[in-house]
Image (cartoon, rainbow, N blue to C red):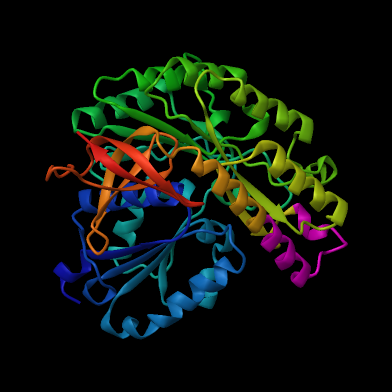
Amino acid sequence: MAAESQKTFYLETFGCQMNVHDSEKVIGTLISEGYRQVQTVEEAGLILYNTCSIRDKAEQKVFHRLADYKKLQAQGKRFGVLGCVAQQEGEKIFERAPFVSLVCGSASYRNLPQMLVQVEAGKQRVTGIDDRETDECFETEFTARSNPHRGYITIIEGCDKFCAYCVVPFTRGKERSRTSESVLGEARQMAALGYTEIQLLGQNVNSYHDPAEKKTFAELLSAVSEIAGIRRVRFTTSHPRDFGRDIVEVIDSHPTLCDHVHLPVQSGSTRVLDAMQRLYTRDQYLERIAWMKAAKREISITSDIIVGFPGETEADFEQTLSLLDEVEYDGVFGFKYSPRPNTPSLKLDDAVPEAEKARRLSVVQEKQREIQRRRYQRHVGQRLEVMVEGKNDARGQWIGRTSQNKVLNFVQRDGVSPVMGGYVSVVTTGSFPNSLLGEMVI
């Protein structure tokens, strides 16, 4: 294989926004090391998969994808597995897929340059797997941001919560936060480059603890929102245990902070929450909802729900349904419980049958759909500001997103075309359970 082809790479990303942003940093690191990104595996000398282990059978999907491209090994291509499945499976990846040369967990990305040198030198098995004791974050000046208007900043990595069903603490390491100064420095740099929306990321973003002890999470939100040129600041995902009233107060007092909070509840039953090791009760969760509903601004609230956790009774499930009615979320991501490697829930008995899990998920989705139908209808007739994200030429509509993170499809008026990444006012004329319709106003 020619030297030039060895310095090309293809990267495919699975999973959450954290993984997407990790890939942006990995891509930037590779480019800084003299690699060139290509769009197909056929063009690449190095083929990488940034993996996610949250979903059921995640590791099988990775191995199936690797098997699809095994034939390319004969062409001298190298393969690498990055991210959560890499951390979870470790050396087992080499055993099941001997043609893989690189296995690197997300906590080891800072060592990628040295690892790439070893791969280039022909080493067959290069491994970067950190234990939970690492204090290092993956900070790099070489981030290759994929969106020119909205950018991500990871402020905290890892997780110390150890929910009974979740593999993240084992694949992402312990919680470790960046200094507020480094976060603000990156945000200012992004503003100088023309970014107008920033999203702060973390497995538990509001568990942020400034190592320099200069700012709380709420104070960091305030500081980022006050940077000149930044029009919107978002953050995800929040953990209910660490969600304080000060977060609501800072949203109320800073219009730049988006009026949307994603606060996963997982279950409406305190008994199930305890079995899940979620560290809060139903009443404590609802107290946080009450803080947001009492805010001066209307805060859009979204959540995650898991149905069919081991031992979840019909009475427990009914409490989840009653929680949906009480909170009236603007959006819910619903999932069937699935056992994940190394998690405490593997030891629990009283599994819920798959068919029953599917039924419960369907009930949740249908109830939530009706709630969202009512919630979205309330916006009809309102004048909302949207950030322009794209255009649907087939429908003659532009695609925008409101501060509350709701998709608003709209038509332009008087021949004035919106600018991609710009902000326009739209009067809402119609609604669906997951989106809004409107007309741009001049």
Residue 234, position as x, y percentages in the image: 42, 33
- Secondary structure mostly seen in magenta is helix
Residue nearest the observer in this picture, 299 or 12 = 299
Taking the spot 69% from the left edge, 46% from the top edge, the residue there is 266
In this rendering, position of residue 175 left or right of residue 360: left
In this rendering, position of residue 404 left or right of residue 43: right
In this rendering, position of residue 92 left or right of residue 128: right
Taking the spot 13% from the left edge, 42% from the top edge, the residue there is 416
Q: Does the magenta run of residues contain 349?
A: yes
Quadrant of res 182:
top left
Q: Is residue 180 above or below residue 93?
A: above
Residue nearest the observer in this picture, 200 or 79 = 200
Quadrant of res 343:
bottom right
Residue 29, position as x, y percentages in the image: 28, 48
Taking the spot 56% from the left edge, 47% from the top edge, the residue there is 372
Residue 431, position as x, y percentages in the image: 45, 48
Residue 337 in view: no
**Magenta region, residue range:** 344-364
Q: How many marks?
A: 0
Q: Is residue 440 above or below residue 243?
A: below
Residue 89, position as x, y percentages in the image: 57, 63
Residue nearest the observer in this picture, 421 or 120 = 421
Residue 240 in view: yes
Taking the spot 23% from the left edge, 41% from the top edge, the residue there is 421
Instruction: Pick the quarter of the image with the N terminus.
Output: bottom left
Instruction: Pick the quarter of the image with the C terminus.
Output: top left
